[in-house]
Image (spheres, helix red, strand yellow):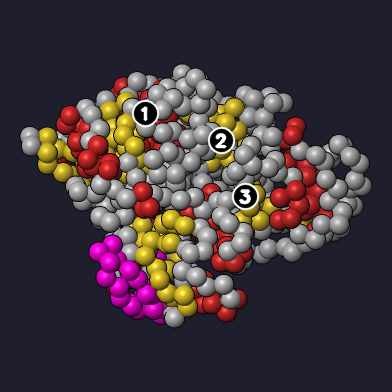
Amino acid sequence: MAQICKNFLISSTCLIAFSVLTACGGGGSSASSTPPAQPISAAPPVSQAPSVPNFVANEFPPSSELRALCQTVRTDTDLNGNRRADQQGELAHELFWLRSWMNETYLFFDQVTDRDPNGFTNVEAYFDDLLVSPPTDRFSFLQPTEDFEARASGTPTFGYGAEFSVLSNQIPRDWRIAFTQAGSPAENGGLTRGARILTIDGADFVNATSNEDIDTIVAGLFPESVGSSHVFGLQYPDGTEADITIESTSLAVDPVNLVEVIPQGERNVGYLHYNSFGPRTGEAQLIDAFETFSDAQIDDLVLDLRYNGGGLLFLSAQLGYMIAGTQSSNRVFYSQEYNSRDPGRNPLTGQRETPILFQSETLGFTDDVTPGRDLPTVNLNRVFILTTDRSCSASEAILNALNGIGVEAIQIGTRTCGKATGQIPTDNCGTTFVPLHFRGVNAVGFGDYDGGFAPGEMTGSAGPVITGCSVNDDLSTPLGDTNEAQLASALNFAETGTCNPAVTAAVKTDVSSSKITGVSQEDMLYQHPRMKSFDLEFGRLDLDNK
């Protein structure tokens, strides 16, 4: 197989280039298993920028004529080391480009009222004006390109190695520690799963409303440098309280957080806590995990996606193959349907799309994975998937795709977030725009899960009834512990074929996961500028790209 280009954010010149499909994964190239290159060449230097178009309602100049004409020209390079395409322009060029590009590519372009860019002072406000309101569109967003690329590539960031679960998104606040990364300051220092945050650096986390206290809280939650020390007042699940001091460090996201083989009598059950399809490092880590499972000859697999907000569709398609094996070979994993102008054509590339198939080979996202090698597989006919409403996008796509080829995806947990759509992240002038571009369907043409998947319920108006058990997230017990409610329920179902009411009843309803999106705007914490990154990271950010 030809060498795969390392950049999956922006198509680039290479023998074969990945485009980023974020549809619960989504990207900007062909949907075939090895997408053809769609290089975006740097524009030739210009002595003078073209004039800014005049606004005429419902008349749109081609976005290609306005692309990369920037108020501020970047002089750095992209992830592949290629020069940015930026040329000198004005803010008005960026706004008119965005207007035309959204009209050409947005899934819901025909529901947008045309807006005159004149009078807008930034691209974010204009972008928001071009979006269709929820519930039709709950997932479009933008982000500084530098931040987006860092998240997508797994670049180390400052933090403690803890992920938060928000149980109450208004005062009185109730934030818990969802899990910690192995070997992190959080794991070593006492930010254990289920602990409730009471104070940060003396500020009352539960009830604070003053600007000073909110600034203190945000500085503690999201440190901006290595060695930043903060004191967390915690209440642990057993009711005890403690003040602990945690120092931030530079951490790369580990998509695979926990791999275990659990003996169950004469049977072996694999357990995989997988928290993101986004970082490039996910491919190598998944391969290592499934080599472990293959060597152990596991009989069942529990795939823990309860905090997995999505990521690369190709990683999801690889994971699907590693679960199902040869029965998934050459089968459709995910088919994209674009906007109503021509649902079968990618409006960003102009190419006809072919479905994404289950991926049986390595793709080479990082230097430690050689592309074209056979992937390990455990050849299972069923898999248990643990979920919450933070299981989105590529996480939902794998459940839908496996059921689409007759591999039973048994859901243990709560309703997923309902992201049946995808995006192709596109950079222009330092901002990466991630509006919805397509819907995705499985091998039997089903993709009506905007309301999410829920155990034992019919999906959509006429979709499948998902086999499984409704079990809340048990924050009182460590992940991977066979007494943790969702895992215990999966193990019981694997043995008996039924749900265990005693396990479900033992979990307090107040520890179920809550969405970050749609938070109460009365809480000043959510109005803090740095909370937007948290919203993207834990509520909406899906690098559902190829």
Task: Residue at 42% x, 62% y: name it.
Answer: 175
Name the quadrant containing residue 145. bottom right
Residue situated in front as seen by the camera: 76 or 166: 166
Q: Is residue 307 left or right of residue 131?
A: left
Residue situated in front as seen by the camera: 445 or 233: 233
Quadrant (top left/top right/bottom left/bottom right) for the N terminus? top left
Q: Is residue 342 left or right of residue 541?
A: right
Can residue 274 be seen? Answer: no
Task: Residue at 41% x, 28% y: name it.
Answer: 457
| Residue type beneath disc 1 | Gly
Determine the secondary structure under disc 3. strand
Task: Pick whichever of labels 3 and 2 is earlier in the sequence.
Answer: 3
Tell me the residue that label 2 is attached to: 421
The residues bearing labels 1 and 3 have C-alpha atoms spaced at a distance of: 32 Å
Tell me the residue that label 3 is attached to: 141
Circle on res. 456: 1
What x and y, as percent, mark residue 331? 41, 22
- 10 Å crowding of disc 3: few (<14), some (14-19), many (20+): many
Q: Is residue 245 left or right of residue 264?
A: right
- Relative to 46, does residue 260 appear above or below in the rendering? above
Determine the secondary structure under disc 2. strand
